[in-house]
Amino acid sequence: MIVRVPGVSFAPVPVKLTIGWIMYIMFLRFVQNHLLTAVPRGTPSDGGKMPSPMTDSFLKRILVSTTAFLVFMILMAHAATADAPLPGGAPPNDKPQASGVAVESSACPSDMRLIAGAYCRKVEQLCLHGSRLVDTGKTYTVAGVTRPIVTGKEYWCKNGCVPEPMDVCYEFVPNHSPCVSTKKVKGADDSVTAVVDEEPMRFCMDTFEWPNRVGELPRVMVSWFEAKKLCEGQGKRLCDDTEWTLACEGPDRLPYPYGWSRDDTLCNIDRQYLAWNAKRLFSNDPAVASAELARLSQREPIGQRRTCVSPFGVYDLTGNVDEWTRNVTGKDYPHASAFKGGHWVRGIRNRCRPKTSSHGPEFAFYAEGFRCCADAKPDCGVE
Ligand SMILES: [Ca+2]
């Protein structure tokens, strides 16, 4: 990890070189105009005694030139090293956050991120390859190689989460996620025009899964009702599924928070399914239930995986634990509750767009958790 000191920025190397040269030339000019000309020279009035070239003026020129050269070399050395990575370099998978997106703001509490942007109702994302492919009959050319464009029908964990080949897209057409027109506007002349359906949003989201404290395990076995109550106890609320999507995909509407291709090294996803025992998991004996939960759990402590971060700086949105949201896009049908992001088991959604709304708000399970959102403070023009 490269440590940056807040408030301190370093100019690019070419700028530093230019500054170094300018300072060097200015320094020489200064020496020439003020120091060297001030050196007393011998005149006939002083008896015609000229200073020796090896003593006064000449030695001072040598001294000044050497000093200026050393200053120049110091500046060049700084230019060459200021942007170099720290010894050892960045650790594997330590992906920097997307640039140009404000992730810290006085509009939100310190443990939340500001999410500000436009949520698109429907996007077009084309899957290049995944499991259970459906050929669209179209082709796509990358680096001179033409390949068929296929789409993947999304499958979620079925039949009691029996592991089976899931329909997962591993690679999307990069940089292709246009907002598709879904709304029609009727004109004065009764003409109908399709318009892009975008909704501006500005809100705060917990940086991590609940309890949003680094080092602790994210909470599971919590119903939608309980999650809602816990958020409200902190003056927050559950996130809408639309808010969750925007926080995950960022302004570029990425399929995954980290990019266009699925990567099981960046987030806690695609781990092996373990058969669960209902009697033990829901036992009235807390010790038995706790032991079964511990056996099943493959969740990671909060803040451990620095690579699973969205363009807005929110962590572990896809994977680790599935997250309760308000089912806004489904207009509370069939339930007011919806899961977003998927959990650690192989083949689960783990993308920004899909949701699961088939579980009612009483549902609580071993890989299901939540995080909270809140309204942002008014924008005063300073963030
Ligand atoms: Ca998650």
Image (cartoon, rainbow, N blue to C red):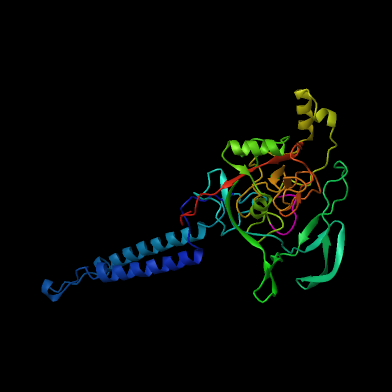
Q: Quadrant of residue 146?
A: bottom right
Q: Is residue 287 left or right of residue 188?
A: right
Residue 291 in the image, given as x and y percentages of width and height: 77, 27
Q: Is residue 364 left or right of residue 66?
A: right
- Taking the spot 78% from the left edge, 42% from the top edge, the residue there is 359
Q: Quadrant of residue 215?
A: top right
Q: Main secondary structure of the magenta part?
A: loop
Residue 270 in the image, given as x and y percentages of width and height: 79, 47
Check residue 263 for magenta coloring. Answer: yes
- Please give the range of residues in magenta: 259-266
Let me know if residue 209 appears in the view: yes
- In front here: 74 or 252? 252
- In front here: 372 or 23? 372
- Taking the spot 58% from the left edge, 58% from the top edge, the residue there is 99
Check residue 83 for magenta coloring. Answer: no
- In front here: 55 or 139? 139
Residue 203 in the image, given as x and y percentages of width and height: 57, 51
Let me know if residue 301 appears in the view: no
